[in-house]
Image (cartoon, rainbow, N blue to C red):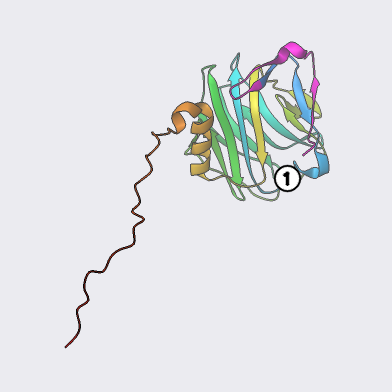
Amino acid sequence: NANNGTSYGGMTSGDQVAGKIGGGLDLETDDYISAANNGSTLNVGQAFTLEAWIKRDTTGPKTVVTKRYGSAYSFKLSFTSSDVLRLDVYNGNGYNNVQGNTITDTNWHYVGAYLNGTSLKLITDGVVHSNTGSKTGTIPYDSNSLWMGVGIWSNNPVDYFDGIIDEVRISNVVRSDCWIKTSYLNQNSPSTFSTVGNEESTPTVDTQAPVISSVASGG
């Protein structure tokens, strides 16, 4: 899709590390990735799904992903200072949000969110949080890039992520709860997600045509 990312801050080749799925990026201090909004394909409209695998080195306010808009943003997935996962969306006049579960450890987690047009939901490890937020108005977009590992306010980067980010996905569709659960289970432990049984033996097929020994005549 040519939404290629450019690194900022003090990132080096050593920040390309093992991730949850394959290779991930180790962000710290002032590091972040800016993905080009090629052909406006990252302007995902009023219904979308956000996903990422993360492993924080430290807790506190951290931004996972931000779609820039002007000097602020169209949407942002982040952690609050209390380690609560949160989704914010701009409605043209102000911000709507939903807050979900608290995550205080620094283990690998599959986090995300979705907007189905009017309702905001959050995701952790394949489970959709019970809390629901409401969106009013229409989310505006522009040609600005998508930032991974940092937020933005008044045109300044804020709330840098400290840790590893892997498998960031932005979809312009609403993934079902079943799809989200399956995606998590498959990525978290592929070897136990499905099992393959023993090969079944080929059944014996009788190729001999049946023989009719007698015919009863009607009377």
Magenta segment, which residues?
Answer: 1-23
Give whichever of 73, 31 is nearer the camera.
31
Q: Quadrant of residue 155?
A: top right
Query: Is 193 contained in the magenta span?
Result: no
User: Can residue 142 be seen here?
Assistant: no
Give whichever of 112, 84 is nearer the camera.
112
Give whichever of 28, 170 is nearer the camera.
170
Identify the residue shown where x is 50% and y is 34%. Answer: 126
Q: Position of residue 87 (x, y in %)?
A: 61, 35
Q: Amino acid at mark 1?
A: Asn
Q: Quadrant of the C terminus?
A: bottom left
Q: Quadrant of the N terminus?
A: top right
Above or below residue 24? Residue 173 is below
Above or below residue 46? Residue 153 is above
Identify the residue shown where x is 57% and y is 44%. Answer: 175
**Mark 1, other Cα within 10 Å: few <14 / some 14–19 / many ≥20:** few
Residue at the outermost top position: 14
Q: Position of residue 96 (x, y in %)?
A: 63, 41
Q: Quadrant of residue 166?
A: top right
- What residue sits right under mark 1 in the picture? 93
Q: Quadrant of residue 76?
A: top right
Residue at the outermost left position: 219
